[in-house]
Image: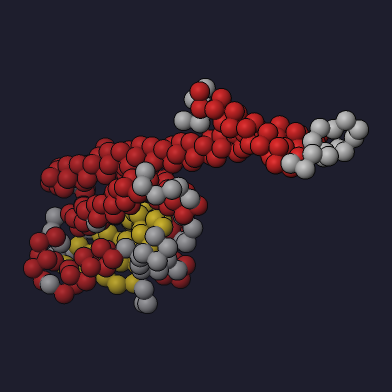
Amino acid sequence: MKNLNEIQNNGLLWVNVTQSEEKVLRALQKRFQFTDQEISESLPSFQRPKFVKRDNYYFLVLHFPVFDRKTRRLGFAEVDFFLNSSSLITVHNGSLAVIEEFFNSCQKKSELREKYFNGTSAHIFFELLNRMLESIFPILLHVNDDTNSIDKILFVKIPDRKMAEEILRLKMNVVNFRRAMQGHKTVLDHLISRGGRELDLQSYQLYINTARDHVAEIWHTLESQKESADALDETNESVVGLRMNEIMKTLTIISVITFPLTLVATIFAIHAGGTPFIDNPFGFAIISIIIFIGAMLMLSVFKIKKWMD
């Protein structure tokens, strides 16, 4: 069937579904006796991370971050796992290359099948999960690089709309990253605590510890990145605020200086009886000097008061 591939070795089966089409999922339901609820939740439309224990299988939903190089935005992809002692079914949209790489490697190399297709299907599941978690670390480094690049130019370049957009993009990437990873610890703990003897989880304690360490390290890094992104946003707002204050201060000084001088010029322009310097041949020069002296006096006051520092 299109978009469905499988590997069978030593009594273990891995079915990999790269497009969650209803026709394919219904065929799997009939084959493995899955419930309608899990089939519906495996169809396109993001579900919350979850763990469900059924009589003959376990159903897990996990999210993983996906970085779009064109838009430089980070989203996430859903992966649904149907797990029992002898089979693993993975359902996803094909955007996570690590799943396809591991599946194709196991399909082509008999030594990998012999290595991972033994014991129970939990062996394949935890090996795949650890590979998927390891693939997240390069994305974390990319987010760190974005944070560092913004930090370097924040105090060098005058903040503008582009800077604000970059910071907002960084914050949204961190938020989406956290959304993708927030359910991993809970789902993993549920599987470990509620998984039956048929999965023989004790034999894969090293895998479990590695997965837990990866999840903890990723979440710790995300906490640090969230704090950094928030700090950059606050710093940018402070720099913009200081710049706006300087602009308003300059405009206020100009207004305070020009308003009384404009008033003086307006008074001399009335041409009422007794207006000084109207008939004086040097009247314009005298009025200009008065306005200039007034401006200098006001500037001196601002300097003395240190309002222009």
Does residue 166 lie above or below 285 as drawn?
below
- In which quadrant of the rendered view does residue 12 lie? bottom left
Residue in front for this viewpoint, 24 or 211: 211
**Residue name at image x 10 percent, y 71 percent:** 110
Residue in front for this viewpoint, 157 or 299: 299
Does residue 80 lie above or below 4 as drawn?
above
In screen coordinates, is 10 left or right of 305?
left
Does residue 49 lie above or below 8 as drawn?
above
**Residue name at image x 14 percent, y 43 percent:** 205
**Residue name at image x 23 percent, y 41 percent:** 217
Q: How many marks?
A: 0
Answer yes or no: is residue 31 visible. Answer: no
Q: Residue furthest bottom?
A: 2
- In which quadrant of the rendered view does residue 38 lie? bottom left
Image coords of residue 191 (percent x, y):
28, 43
In screen coordinates, is 237 left or right of 6?
right
Image coords of residue 244 (percent x, y):
53, 39
Answer yes or no: is residue 123 visible. Answer: yes
Q: Quadrant of the N terminus?
A: bottom left
In screen coordinates, is 244 left or right of 14?
right
Q: Residue furthest right?
A: 273
Image coords of residue 58 (percent x, y):
33, 50
